Amino acid sequence: MKIRFCENNKGKGKVVRRLKEEFPDLDIKVKDCIKECSTCSEKPMAKVSKDIITASDGGLLYKKIVAIINTN
């Protein structure tokens, strides 16, 4: 499973660290840009496989991503 974060997205820092610590086998990367600028500028987000996941804050984004990981 690929998880991508944009370097410019606010709220990604703790989410990325926690995911890398708890799921070291996943392909988790912070890219310069993931081509989702309108969403990225508005709220915390990540691209999980090919789906865009958004949340109101980093904690909720983390929970949403973990839920997806656990269903796969």
Image (tube, rainbow, N blue to C red):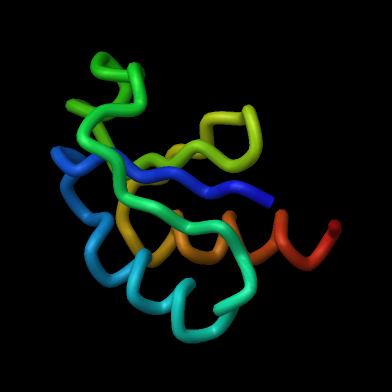
Q: Give the residue drawn at x 21%, y 35%.
A: 32
Dividing the image into 4 quarters, which one contains the C terminus? Answer: bottom right
- Res 9 quadrant in image: top left
Q: Position of residue 60 (x, y in %)?
A: 44, 59
Q: Residue at x 53, y 30 (%)?
A: 52
Query: Is 5 rendered above or below residue 58?
Result: above
State the image coordinates of residue 8 (x, y, percent, origin top left): 14, 38
* 39 lies above or below 7: above
The residue positioned 22% from the left and 55% from the top of the image is 11
Kindly give the residue lying farthest to the bottom in the view shown.
21
Q: Give the residue drawn at x 56%, y 58%.
A: 27
Q: Quadrant of residue 44?
A: top left
Q: How many marks?
A: 0
Apparent side of residue 33 relative to residue 49 in the rendered image (left or right):
left
Q: Residue furthest right?
A: 72
38 left or right of 47 in image = left
Q: With respect to residue 36, does 54 lie above or below?
A: below
Q: Quadrant of residue 59?
A: bottom left
Q: Position of residue 50 (x, y in %)?
A: 63, 28
Residue 63 is situated, as x and y percent measured from the top left of the image, at 55, 65
